[in-house]
Image (tube, grey):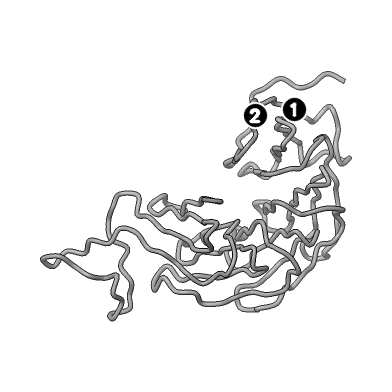
Amino acid sequence: MTCLSFNDDSTIVAGGFQDSFIKLWSIDGSPLKSVLKNDEHNRTIDGVAVNGCRRLVGHSGAVYGLDFSPDNNYLLSASEDKTVRLWSMDTYTSLVSYKGHNAPVWDVKFSPLGHYFATASHDQTARLWSCDHIYPLRIFAGHLKDVDVVEFHPNSTYLFTGSSDKTVRMWDISRGESVRVFIGHHMPINCMACSPDGRWLATAGEDSIINVFDIASECGISRREQWIIRIHNPRNLQLSQLWQPKIQKMEN
């Protein structure tokens, strides 16, 4: 398994695999029934549906990123095959294949509003997409190495990108421009989370450190608005949404 994602109400979990497929599980074991009447997975025993998992097949490479839409009706998947797919949670079928990246896609995230999504890739770019367009609307270029992770600001007007070049960039989505650069890591960045109020950004890297930034700071990074948390095992670390940290600030 290469990635994991829960839907918004935590009733379904999706896992991406090196073997290029996606597997869905119902958390409480209830059946994942399709609206398609001829779907063989809708089988029943004594009139009761029994299938509590689904397998989605469509990619031709490992699946590295997954994200459910805010309304839980769709699932996005990012793959080594350079594409992103949109899946219906009503029919459990692939609706669209989005092409534009020139290398494997490491991460994908829906915007808080749901219609747009962003991707991160080995081609050193992040891209903004609309669900109803198969080609990207914006290309965010500026990182010097892989863009490994993406995260939307809660107001949907900014996008954060974390890179193997050890930096995080904040982009103005409407202009497609980098408006801030956060530094502080000594190794590639592998996950990020933005607080629900949009004030704090947490970043975690392979250097065993979580940095917490005050996004409203006038400069890209200020020691006055930075916290550092040391961790012992950064491998496969994930950050969920972050509330105001109750940890001590670093001294200048």
Mark 2 surroundings: few (<14), some (14-19) or many (≥20) residues within 10 A:
few
Q: Residue at x 65, y 72 (%)?
A: 130
In the image, 23: left or right of 59?
left
Q: Is residue 66 visible?
A: yes
Nearer to me, 57 or 67:
57
The part of the image, by quadrant, that contains residue 102 is bottom right
Q: Which residue is mark 2?
A: 245
Q: Is residue 231 above or below residue 160?
A: above
Could you say which is closer to the camera, residue 1 or residue 86?
Answer: 1
Q: Amino acid at mark 2?
A: Pro
Task: Note whether 205 is above or below 37 in the view shown.
Answer: above
Q: Dot 1 corresponds to which residue?
A: 227
- Quarter of the figure with residue 41: bottom left
Q: Nearer the viewer, residue 251 or 29?
A: 29
SS assignment at label 1: strand
Could you tell me which residue is drawn at 57 percent across and 70 percent down?
60
Residue positioned 66% across, 26% down in the render: 231
- Measured as percent of width and height from the top left, residue 202 is found at 69, 38
Dot 1 and dot 2 residues touching (CB under 8 Å)? yes
Can residue 200 be seen here? The reply is no
Residue type (three-letter) at the residue carrying disc 1:
Trp
